[in-house]
Amino acid sequence: MEVEQDTKDTELNIAKRPGIGTLGTTIQHKCNYYRIIRFPDASINHYSFDIAPKANKDTIAYVYDKLALQNGFNAVFDGNASIYSVSPLNLEKEKGGSHFEIHVSQSDNMRVRNGTYKIVLRFVQNLSFDELQNYVTGRSASISEVIKCIMALNAFINFTVRRNYPAIGKSIFPHPRQIAHSDLELNPIILPGALELRRGFYQSLRPAWNTLAINVDICASVFYLGGPFLEVVAKLLNKRNADEFRQGLSSRDWTILSKFVRRLKIRTIHRGQRRPVYLVRKLSTEPADRLYFKINEARVSVAEYFFRTYNRRLSFENLPCLLVRNDVYLPLEVCDILPGQRFDGQLADMAHADMIKHTCVRPAERFKRISKAVQEIFKHSQDPHINSIGMDVDRENMTIDGRVLVPPTVEFNSKSVNQTHVPKDGRWNLVNKIVVQGKSLENWSVLVFGSRVPEQSIDQFMRQFRETASQKGLNVSNKPKITFTNPIGNVQQALYQACLDAQFNKALPPQLVFCIMEQTGPLYGEIKRIGDTILGVPTQVLLAKLVTKRGGLDQVCANISLKVNVKLGGKNSLLSRGQLNFVSQVPTMIFGADVFHPGRGERKPSVAAVCASMDIDAVVYSGRYSVNKVPRNETIESLEDMVNDLFRAFWERNKSLPNRILFYRDGVSEGQFQHVLNIEVKAIKAVISRCYKPGSEPTLTFIIVQKRHHTRFMPENSRDGDRLGNCIPGTVIDTSIVVPHEFDFFLQSHYCLQGTARPIHYNILYDEHNFSADEIQTLTYRLCYLSARCTLSISLVPPVYYAHLIANRARHYLKWEEESSEVSGASISSISDVKDALQNSMFFI
């Protein structure tokens, strides 16, 4: 699919709100929004800010501050490329804008780069807030002007706090010393892996119903530890101190360090007051005393060069060096890691557990911290820039009406003691219940990676699994062969042999291989890649700690039974007749789609995934995936091909094409709504036009699913919440904090086990089914009870969750290699296909 912008005359229109929902019990909720009680009445002058040469955020902020001070600007800066002021700036009317030159020689901020910077300011436009007022009151408005106004107001509300405290995006991370005598709990938390967790606060202005509001929340982010390089690395590699490095690095330590330093900012300390900052490209394979380069045709080691040039004999010449420029290597001991660098990689299990422990905050405590932040940090009423535009902010958070929808009835096999069950708090169990359609497991085996788990423990666990699975309606026969293998050996050969061991019935292919790992790591991805794309056999991976767990095995084995049954093609539970009429009345496909982007600094391509329901009960799904060619592209480039494939799979199963299509799309920011609507809805329409005769086309509804936001709710009365103080599953909000004409709603569909629940924001962009608010809210909520993996109502609709699982799985199928240039960042990529035997199964569960 081509990814060009459509012209405006072919743009699709975003769906309008048909009304508000009425179903459910009305309950008052606190919301972490602060109402704007006086709309801004000033007009704003907007100027562009261009800087050359290019600079980092800290340098740009420093240059602007110096420019504003020298020229007496009373304005706010958005930190990127826009300046806003109530009064016109005193600029010379020069052709091509007003030109300035700022010289930076010293700064307390180590991330500010010295040099001479040329600045060009240009008047862009005068912004009035009339269009914004029209927008929030439901009248016709220019969306482009509304976006500009919101961006300007966000610059006004955030300018002061971003100057007072360290900031990343719209979040600030005050140092405890900056907030005297406060109980905001801002002390950094040291995490395993030479990382630290910092807690801070977030605020953003948002349009609301007939008004504006500021969304305020707590936040947290993980940073690299700053300080002397070897001291930080000692923490990374679990050494007592740097002296332990005198023996050099093991190959394992080198691998860990090599991954850690990539794109890390460091400064040198061996040249007195001159301490330049560098971005690390990679870690050398050779130590400093054996890493050579040429000077005047003479071959010199890095260690020898430092002794000759700086009269510095390296204490750790047996350690590798950091490549920071072409042929420029720095020994580790002459480097400091700059503080305040955000970590965007994947946390190890222990670090992730620590982070969760310190960031999971119950609703009452969360709202208390938010209130304190408004009083002690944001101080809206005292902010001169907010006051300058005539805007007033309420000192108390908003109280809004929400509705709690009735949960659906979940249905099991007719042989169950309790065939139907109405879940309470979005949860149920499998006691006295049998899955709707249990499959037979005959050809299976067990492969253990490692030798620490006793075979007797594995045998006992598998016996328990067979008993539990049989109780739940599966037919599990044969005692599986248990084989041990080296986790760093030939994984493909081991899995192939396990498949041979699984064939009790030679007339049937292997059905499943249980793989037991001693710890998480890259081995998981390799098992899945080989099983899915080479052997075509489902795998069920277990951690050894589950197998050797004392007590609670019934529940563990019941949960595994659910996954195994679905991988074999079974069905676990349904919703009772009449509760999914939208799906059951006529052939219907419910799609989910997501794009998985690599972490910041990673050069891997993005992977897109789409899945769709294949049956009348909306519990059987097939999935497809592809690689986006354009780096970090929000749209799904191969959407047409994947939808076409899924249409074919639906036809092969049902001998008909769908009459209705409901498409849930994850991973799209608000600024991309119109673009995704024009590209992806048209892509789906293109497939429909090829597959259907004119006049027989299906109706289509396209919904954006947003989970990365800072909106939180809490029942006003604790009696209306759960034991943690969260909202009850089924809580829906479609007034007060949304705008009147856009068709959207917030839904909390799950029971939150810890912390504060995060609702999902659903935005209906395109709607040919003419859903009422109640219809789409109820349908969306009921779908959340159909996850195949658990006995819970999950936080978002299953097709989107499955698409996320597929995209994550497909990352392991990716083959890519970076080009040799350290600067280009380009990569050549391809992705392996899942074997035909698995393609239309739920292998990804």
Image: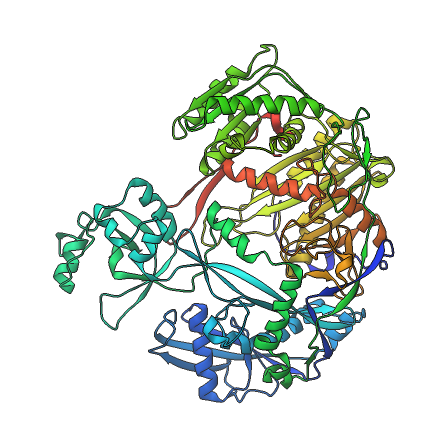
Residue at image position (26%, 54%) is: 242
**Figure check: 247 above or below 31:** above
Q: Percent position (x, y) of residue 597?
A: 54, 49
Q: Is residue 34 left or right of residue 108?
A: right
**Figure check: 522 above or below 665:** above
Q: Percent position (x, y) of residue 749?
A: 73, 49
**Figure check: 550 above or below 469:** below
Name, please, the residue furthest toward the top: 506
Residue at image position (47%, 22%) is: 455
Q: As rendered, which of 596 and 443 lies closer to the eye?
A: 443
Residue at image position (26%, 66%) is: 269
Q: Quadrant of residue 560?
A: top right
Q: Percent position (x, y) of residue 80?
A: 51, 70
**Figure check: 64 above or below 817:** below
Q: Is residue 536 visible?
A: no
Q: As rendered, which of 756 and 564 lies closer to the eye?
A: 756
Q: Percent position (x, y) of residue 227?
A: 34, 63
In which quadrant of the rendered image does the N terminus lie? top right
Q: Quadrant of residue 333?
A: bottom left
Q: Is residue 190 visible?
A: yes
Q: Is residue 234 left or right of residue 684?
A: left
- Look at the image and name its color scheme: rainbow
Disc tally is 0
In which quadrant of the rendered image does the C terminus lie? top right
Q: Is residue 619 left or right of residue 587?
A: left
